[in-house]
Image: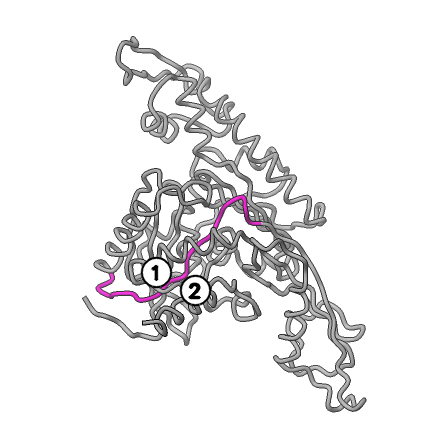
Amino acid sequence: MKNSEHNNLVSGIDIGSEKIYCAIGLRFPETSKVKLLGIGISPVDESFKKGTISNRNKLINQIEIAVNEAEIMADQKINNAYISLTGDHIKSMNTQSAIALNRNNNIDNNSISQKDINRVLELTQGIALPPDRDILHTIPQEFIVDTLEKIANPIGLSGRRLEGHVHLVTAARTAMKNLVECTEEIGIKVNGLVFKPLAAASSSLTNDEIELGVSLIDIGATTTGIAVYKEGAVRHSAIIPIGSQNITNDIAVMLRTSINTAENIKIKYSSAKASLSSPNLDFKISDVEDVEDRNISEYKLSEYVEARMEEIFHLSKKEINRAGLNNALTYGLVLTGGGSQLRNISALAKDYFGTPVRIGKPIINIEGNKNFIDKPINATVLGLLIWPYSYYNQHSKHESNVFSLLDNIKQIIKDFF
């Protein structure tokens, strides 16, 4: 295995409540595409739930399994990676700030530079946060130069006043710190943490969708992420503490069966829209001792599944409405995550939201294994490969100071010894 120092090698680790995915890719700067070289998957055994670490040692071992599997396939050893972040501790908001461009009152010398943009972005972070929270992302929405609005990149323009509108994503400092430390325990430096639905969006949404308006719903096992885009920027993002595993739990309780059996039944027999399943097709349940075999129709099962999916969509719709865009989302919805693989989920979403719906396969600038790339459950980990080169990452002024905090601690230890 090569211990690669290749500048164009990229890697991402998506840590979920059911599985950990690691992907290694090679970026081609001339085309901005990433070729998938290796993938690794490890089951999560009660070590990570809803964005919180419940068993640190187990999680470290499971991350290492996924990383090793990807390295073997890629024949490359990785030293760093981007990591996805989720959990109901994550909150977002929109804010703005402005600076004067008074350079001796001479407008000819008032061309806007990257330094000016950095000053504006720093000021947008001047919000009062609890001591246990930190800013994860500062993502520009638009800039205003004097009276000229909706400017994506003001560098080189002249004016007397620069105003910036941004989307801030904040998270619990301890949650970020613990995740970084677990990953670095196996020798992988964390280049950055990325809010899960934003990572999924970077591999699944087209430029037209981002410009004309779309909402992404990333349905994970225990959380659902929301990201609303319009006019080329993120307008709102959020996390809902409910996911597809809640459907599995409902089936297990209803049928008095094990979680594993309930998961298999969900995948094999259920439909997100009950009216599209048959009341005449029965299947047998017989995995519990001392309980006689029972039959249930696919339609009856799907009624429970539909009820839970409608709850997820109801909470998602409330978050989407907070973006204040009303019916301005031209492209409607894009669904990603493991929960989006439920049968007939697009039909249910279309009826519930009354908008166009598509399943978000990670197709943007990714080449390689089609069986892996074509699945919406892999949108996040493949989005992490693209994130270092995305517009939002390049123009984000701030990444969590958890990383600088850890570096300082390491330096103190080195100096001490």
Magenta stretch? Answer: 74-90
Image position of 17 with respect to 412: above or below:
above
Label 1 SS: helix
Amino acid type at circle 2 is Leu
Q: Tag 1 or tag 2, which sits nearer the N-term? A: 1
The residue depicted at 54 percent of the width and 59 percent of the height is 136
Numbered mark located on residue 406 in the image: 2
209 left or right of 271 in image = right
Q: Left or right of 169: which side holds 325?
A: right
Tag shown at residue 103 = none
Of residue 103 and residue 202, the one placed in the foreground of this image is 103
As for residue 143 lying within the magenta part, the answer is no
Report the residue at 29% width, 55% height from top. 39
Query: In the image, is 326 to the left or to the right of 254?
Result: right
Please tell me whether residue 74 is drawn above or below residue 221 in the rendered image: below
Q: Please name the residue shown 56% across and 47% down the image.
A: 226
Marks counted in the figure total 2
Q: Is residue 80 left or right of residue 314?
A: left
**Residue indicated by mark 1:** 184
Q: Position of residue 320 (x, y in %)?
A: 64, 45
* Quadrant of the image occupied by residue 262: top left
288 in relation to 394, above or below:
above
Quarter of the image with the N terminus in it = bottom left
The quarter of the picture where the C terminus appears is bottom left
Residue type at mark 1 is Glu
